[in-house]
Image (cartoon, helix red, strand yellow):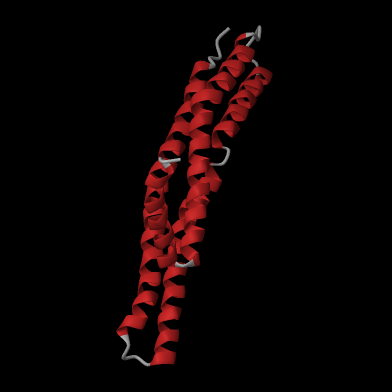
Amino acid sequence: MEALYYYIPALEGVRDFLELGGIVLVAIAVLTLVMWTLIFERIFYMRAKHPKVARQALEIWESRPERKSWHAHQIREELISVAGQGLQQNLALLATCVALCPLMGLLGTVTGMVNVFEVMAVSGSGNPRSMAAGVSMATVPTMAGMVAALSGVAMSAFLERKAFRERELLAESMTMDH
């Protein structure tokens, strides 16, 4: 129970940060969580499940008595394609999440500026203290969206390259001799 007290200030800091950016910052946090869940799922698949799928495809190919006919070539292409589909799964969704992060940040900028203009309309343009909350609500989501997108771009590119490389390795290992 004592260890919980160490986390309370950190949780308060997260709460304050989310309040600073408004509801759009919460949406960016959820989108970032979904994005990183997809990233970890792809890493897990490529490290744990894909080797088994590739090994099974290679075993099916190696068990064929002949490998030179048109029919054998089509079976080889199917085996590579099925394994490649497993590698490509969720990569388009991941790229969409990466692209949405800065757009959500821009949405936060617009909503924050709308708050600034509302304050200016109600209290006049001479009250900078009342406008400060709207300005922070405009800048914090923009920054958060960009940071989330940058982290996702690097991992998305890595996973795309890894999927392509794994597919090519499988294709190279399925020789057409016999």
**Does residue 24 lie above or below 99 as drawn?**
below
State whether residue 62 is above or below residue 155.
above
The total of numbered circles placed on residues is 0
For the C terminus, give its image quadrant.
Answer: top right
Answer with left or right where residue 166 lies relative to residue 134.
Answer: right
Q: Nearer the viewer, residue 31 or 49?
A: 31
**Left or right side of 39 for 62:** right
- Which residue does the image show at 39% across and 58% down from the upper left? 144
Q: Residue furthest right?
A: 71
Figure check: 63 above or below 51: above
Side (left or right) of 154 relative to 79: left
Q: Nearer the viewer, residue 71 or 54?
A: 54
Q: Left or right: where does residue 59 sit relative to residue 173?
A: right
The answer to whether residue 171 is visible is no
Q: Position of residue 99 (x, y in %)?
A: 47, 55
Residue depicted at 41% across the width and 64% down the height = 141
Q: Residue furthest front?
A: 2
Residue 76 in sight in this render:
yes
**Residue 162: where, in percent of width, then height?**
44, 32
In the rendered image of this protein, does residue 78 appear above or below residue 10?
above
